């Protein structure tokens, strides 16, 4: 088991030396990670602004155990910027970066139909669109072509905003990505237009885009605190109902903020498992970038906190040991698991397939008969660019079970129950087609993004989620949101709406 946790606090010891930034002036500073009472704390000192401490990881023993889950990086085919100022100021990607981009994000606009108290995109809410930007077809075409040139055959792109469904050409953008062979296109949305606009939903269904749906919880106070409106649950439920009818597949995306909605984590998981439209949940720890709630940097939600909540709030339906770090980025950036669903049971794949053995890149080097095909499939499933709910993900999970000699039935020869509400084909699982089989596979991931408080230059070198730019660059996600890149891009797009290509 990877994630057994310790309860005995130890005296402060040094774990790592790295570099970070001053949360005030963003100057690059030496930083130290220390273990304090089984938590990982970052210490740094700015000559101008003094000493800073911030929580990096809520379980130091877990932090130490996951270090081997670090896949050697694969560089992009092209670098778009030169090394001049040094990391993290040459993003684009520059030759110092150690990983290609598993996922490319295109923020198509800055306008939104919500005005959320937390918004790392600093989107412009209703009635406040002055100075907002909206990308053109030419700009998105150039960005996609640049992404293809850097990645060769990118498989995953996400359209985001603002609220991307407000863009008049969002369906055209999805088509542009598909035309370039990008088979898995995500639409990151709050679901309001989907809940209300019949014509838009009809056209969206034709694209077969995968929906990345903001879903923070069920309590009115949760939605009021995080999104500025207490009445959002009804809208979200309506959107999900309509997405199920349209056969569009959904990943729920809850932002978890300490003291706000951590008590809803288990309920979100159980709801997602039962809902016919939902094929996964991607939890994200709230972080301090652009608009956010005030908090003590030493008191924040991190990945171990969410994992423990999943276990306790689902009564062990999923356990900490079911989750394995995502190895294409730094191991502390995220964890994930997949589960097979039957009418009665939830069977996490790591309980029947040795996922942790394969994705531990220290241990598996000493295994002479390692199944290379199984490793390749697990790497694709445990990736920042995983195709959740896709036919490919379904095939990989089933093949992984087969290679591990696990019967697909897992002691239940007939999976014709209501799946948890989703599988209504009325046939034994052996007669399901691939798309129907996908309804029996569920993914849960937890992402922990960095901000200026806990920014770690060592980790940003391995970031594989990039925000694509109109000049062809790709900025690592945490650098883009925490170091001023976002502000510079927004200012230029407002001053030069047609900005495209290199200077």
Image: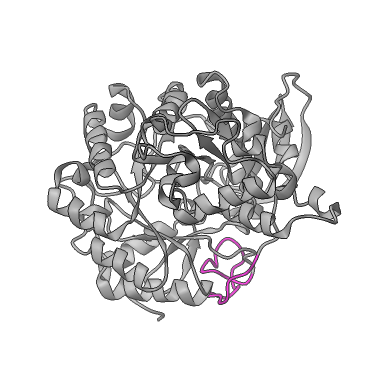
Task: Give the percent coordinates (x, y) of residue 199.
Answer: 13, 53
Q: Position of residue 253 (x, y in %)?
A: 40, 40
In the rendered image, residue 145 lying in the magenta stretch gets the answer: no
Q: Can the viewer see residue 50?
A: yes
Q: Nearer the viewer, residue 36 or 69?
A: 69
**Is 461 situated above or below 381?**
below
Q: Residue farthest to the bottom?
A: 503
Q: Residue at x 43, y 74 (%)?
A: 472
In the figure, is residue 460 to the left or right of 212? right
User: Residue 422 occupies which quadrant of the picture?
Assistant: top left
Identify the image quadrant of the N terminus.
top right
The residue lying at 32 percent from left, 57 percent from top is 208
Confirm whether residue 29 shows in the render.
Answer: no
Question: What kind of secondary structure does the magenta stretch mostly adopt?
Answer: loop
Residue at screen point 29% across, 49% down = 123
Identify the residue at image location x=24%, y=39%.
239
Residue 75 is a magenta residue? yes
Where 331 falls versus 473 (above or below)? above
Residue 477 drawn at (x, y percent):
48, 55
For the record, the magenta segment spans 74-95
Q: Quadrant of the C terminus?
A: bottom left
332 with respect to 284 (left or right): right
Q: Position of residue 309 (x, y in %)?
A: 53, 24
């Amino acid at each position: 088991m990877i994630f057994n946790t310790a309860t005995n606090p130890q005296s402060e010891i040094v774990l790592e030396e790295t570099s970070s930034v001053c949360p005030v002036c963003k100057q690059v500073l030496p930083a130290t990670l220390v273990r304090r009472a089984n938590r990982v704390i970052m210490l740094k000192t700015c000559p101008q602004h003094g000493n800073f401490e911030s929580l990096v990881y809520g379980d130091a023993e877990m932090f130490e155990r996951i270090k081997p889950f670090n896949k050697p990086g694969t560089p992009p085919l092209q670098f778009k910027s030169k090394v001049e100022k040094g990391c993290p100021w040459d993003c684009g990607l520059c030759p110092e970066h150690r990983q290609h981009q598993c996922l490319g994000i295109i923020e198509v606009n800055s306008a939104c139909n919500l005005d959320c108290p937390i918004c790392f995109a600093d989107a412009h809410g209703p009635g406040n669109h002055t100075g907002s930007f909206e990308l053109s077809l030419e700009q998105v075409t150039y960005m996609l072509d640049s992404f293809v040139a850097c990645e060769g055959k990118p498989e995953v792109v996400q359209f985001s905003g603002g609220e991307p469904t407000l863009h008049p050409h969002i369906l055209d953008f999805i088509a542009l990505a598909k035309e370039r062979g990008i088979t898995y296109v995500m639409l990151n949305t709050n679901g309001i237009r989907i809940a209300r606009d019949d014509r838009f939903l009809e056209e969206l269904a034709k694209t077969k885009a995968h929906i990345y749906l903001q879903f923070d919880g069920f309590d009115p106070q949760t939605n009021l605190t995080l999104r500025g409106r207490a009445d959002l649950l009804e809208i979200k439920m309506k959107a999900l109902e309509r997405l199920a009818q349209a056969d569009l597949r959904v990943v729920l995306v809850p932002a978890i903020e300490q003291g706000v909605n951590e008590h809803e984590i288990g309920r979100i998981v159980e709801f997602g498992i039962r809902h016919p439209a939902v094929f996964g949940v991607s939890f994200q720890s709230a972080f301090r970038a652009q608009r956010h709630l005030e908090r003590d940097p030493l008191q924040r939600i991190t990945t171990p906190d969410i994992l423990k909540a999943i276990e306790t709030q689902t009564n062990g339906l999923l356990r900490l040991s079911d989750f394995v770090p995502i190895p294409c980025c730094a191991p502390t950036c995220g964890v994930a698991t997949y589960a097979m669903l039957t009418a009665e049971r939830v069977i996490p794949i790591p309980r029947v397939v040795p996922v942790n053995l394969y994705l531990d890149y220290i241990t598996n080097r000493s295994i002479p008969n390692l199944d290379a095909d199984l490793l390749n499939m697990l790497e694709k499933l445990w990736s920042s660019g995983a195709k959740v709910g896709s036919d490919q993900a379904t095939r990989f999970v089933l093949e992984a079970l087969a290679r591990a000699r696990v019967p697909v039935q897992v002691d239940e020869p007939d999976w014709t129950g209501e799946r948890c509400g989703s599988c209504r084909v009325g046939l034994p699982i052996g007669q399901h087609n691939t798309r129907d089989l996908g309804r029996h596979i569920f993914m849960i991931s937890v992402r922990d993004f960095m901000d200026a408080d806990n920014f770690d230059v060592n980790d940003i070198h391995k970031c594989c989620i990039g925000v694509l730019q109109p000049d062809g660059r790709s900025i690592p996600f945490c650098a883009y949101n925490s170091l001023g890149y976002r502000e510079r891009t927004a200012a230029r797009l407002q001053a030069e709406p047609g900005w495209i290509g290199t200077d």
